[in-house]
Amino acid sequence: MPTPAPMLRHGKAGPLTEHVDDPEPVDLALLAEIIGEQERAELLETAGLLVEELPDLLAPLHAAVAAQDRQALADAAHAAKSAASSAAAMPLAQVLDGIESDAAGAEWASLGMQAEAVRREFERLAAYLRACG
């Protein structure tokens, strides 16, 4: 399975930093491996299903940040990360993985920045799929 280049780096030690060479928001080759489908239209449709589901998965994440509820944040990040990974939206999954990992002890300001990065990456994914569709 190919390993996508990281788009965002997270951690307790420093702020988020964006890389110049952002990978595509969805890895269609990886998605083809996951679902066993090669036709581009089918792959884009499958990725589009994620975009439809994600707002419901991300709402609890943003609510947990607002409430400063670490367990709810970790749980919401895990659920959304699983969905993003299943649809090969690896940059989004990586940001969510960072939140899940950092939820237990990172400063709330850092977690808020990561939640904002999730929102931006979701918007980038949705725009990419609209442009491809």
Image: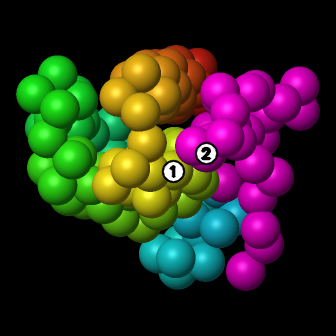
Q: Measured from the top left, where is residue 128 in percent x and y?
A: 58, 26
Q: Is residue 15 magenta?
A: yes
Q: Tell me which amino acid carries mark 2.
A: Gly
Mark nearer the N terminus (2 vs 1): 2
Find residue 113 and report its horizontal and vertical position in percent: 47, 22
* Left or right side of 26 for 64: left
Q: Nearer the viewer, residue 16 or 119?
A: 16
Q: Residue at x 35, y 64 (%)?
A: 82
On the rendered image, what quadrant is the N terminus found in? bottom right
Q: Which mark is residue 11?
A: 2
- Above or below, 111 against 10 in this view is above
Could you tell me which secondary element the residue under label 1 belongs to?
A: helix
Q: Confirm whether the magenta stretch covers residue 85.
A: no
Left or right: 26, with 52 as reference point = right
Q: Which residues are magenta?
A: 1-27
Give the number of the disc on residue 67: none
- In terms of secondary structure, what is the magenta stretch mainly? loop
Residues marked 2 and 1 touching at CB (< 8 Å): yes
Residue type at mark 1: give it. Gly
Q: CA distance from mark 2 to mark 1?
A: 7 Å
Q: Residue at x 61, y 45 (%)?
A: 11
**Residue on which disc 1 sits:** 98
Judge from the rendering whether residue 57 lies leftward or rightward of residue 51; answer left or right.
left
Residue 114 rendering spot, x and y as whole percentages:
47, 31
Q: Quadrant of residue 10?
A: top right
